[in-house]
Amino acid sequence: MKTIYLFLIGSLLITSCQQEKETRAFDILIKDANIVNTTTGEVLKSQNIGIIADTIARIAALDQSINWKGTQIVNAKDKYVIPGLWDMHIHFGADTLVSENKNMLPLYLANGVTTIRDCAADLSQSVLKWRKQIDNGELAGPTIFTAGPKLEGKNSIWPGDLEIENEEELSKALDSLDKLQVDFVKITDNTLSPELFLKSVEKATERGYKTSGHIPFALSINEVSKAGLTTIEHMGYMLKAGAAKELEAIEKYKNGEIDYSTANTQITQSFNETTALNRYKELAQNGTAIVPTLIGNRIISYWDEDNHSDDKELQYIGPGIIETYQWRVNRVKNASPEAIEARHQKYQKLISLIPLIKKSGMPIIAGTDAGFLNSYIYPGFALHEELEIYQEAGLTPLEALQTSVINGPKYFGLSDKYGSVSEGKIADLLILNSNPIKDITATKDIDQLIKKNKVYNKSQLDKMLQDVKHLYN
């Protein structure tokens, strides 16, 4: 027995020595990193990360991988490694501003955002081209998932949409989206009838698409969720979902007994936390998530305190895109004191829903609404602010981080490829100077970024910003 025991000990020592002496070659070798576990928040210290092509091939403790080699060496001593960030609600748009939209791509990378979800506008062909070029390594930018053109009713306000008014046209529109090979389907309600909206969700879901949308007032949130809506875009709909009188107000509105304004007031005034928690649990069971886009609410709600004319980020935005911001500004800049106070109160109510939604088990997915049209929501920069809002609203830094790096990939069924710093995962990596699990603002303190088998140090990331700045200044 003693002989067997000594043999086993000797074997382990030999194996250990072999591991230490093992020589492996990688395209990129990140040395002596602290890896943040995005599920538990634990930090695995002093790790070497070996990358081959665009994949994490091996991870081992520093003392177990002393002979590892890398074509490119990245010193990550005292740094923290997390997956690249995902912004799950952005927009490209305005067909006369293609170049200014394309110039947004480096802004995302410079801010550590390695993946974006384009939620439809009128630049579908350009966006699809960029998606392919980025995937092929021909263009520097974040991985793009796109809806292509959104589904809408006839004569909507949205340019470039697919307008339908019956099920036959819906089928043809979905056929066209199939040909474009879009990644999900966006459906909005400017002129699309509630009945056809619901049918659009059902038919797109039947074809295997994830669906995203703005929900018609005449439909209950749970009704659309049961039809297959994968994400609710914007937090305002969650107030409606939590109203005790949601169904009653909808029926009175549909019957012409009250107008929209009165119905909306009744819904807002009847919000009830117990009702909301139960409804949110139902939404979670249906597989529906929320993309809050709260940064836009904050900007508009507090326009009286900051009109953003001095934002340093404006130097990176094209003049045509800045001009598109004006339509929202015009709606708020001359508001009465009563309207301003109402905006403040509504914003505070919206952010108070974050802990309630978290408690319900309904997934929160980070998205900003950045891009054209949406005032002063800056590509790349805005995601950090969105995550900070979640933290301020009551999420832990880890929970805030998860809304981006875990829930983003999960939406597309890509948790096997993204969401953690693990062997076999795509090597979209963000190297930070401080620990984001202590404070989510650490995501802004970037040391290096790895994307598409390329390392960008801080100087190179800063140069991305400067190059865009020089296009406009």
Image (cartoon, rainbow, N blue to C red):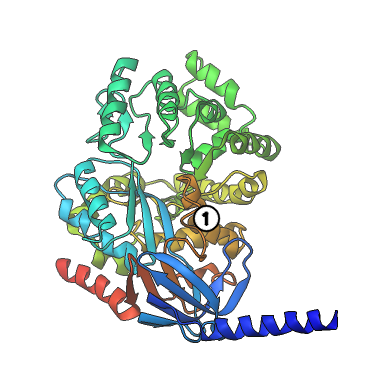
Q: How many marks?
A: 1
Q: Secondary structure at mark 1?
A: loop
Q: Residue furthest right?
A: 1
Residue occupied by mark 1: 406
* Residue at x-position 31% and y-position 24%: 153
Residue at (35%, 43%) from the top-left corner?
119
Residue 166: image location, x then y, percent: 32, 15
- In the picture provided, is 338 more to the left or to the right than 357? left
**Most extreme residue toward the top, as rendered?**
255
| Residue 375: image location, x then y, percent | 32, 52
Relative image position of residue 37 (x, y in whole percent): 58, 67
- The answer to whether residue 473 shows anywhere in this view is no
- Depth check, front residue: 34 or 187: 34
**Between 52 and 239, the one nearer to me in the picture:** 52
Q: Is residue 467 above or below residue 322?
A: below
Which amino acid, mark 1?
A: Ile
Locate residue 272, reporting x and y percent.
66, 37
Left or right, 365 with respect to 130, comes to: right
Write down the quadrant of residue 14 in the picture: bottom right
Q: Is residue 364 above or below residue 424?
A: above
> Quick one: quadrant of the C terminus?
bottom left
**Residue 3 in the image: above or below residue 318:** below
In the shown orientation, is residue 351 left or right of residue 71? right
Q: Residue at x 60, y 60 (%)?
A: 39
**Residue 53 in view:** yes
- State the residue in front, 383 or 303: 383
Quarter the N terminus occupies:
bottom right
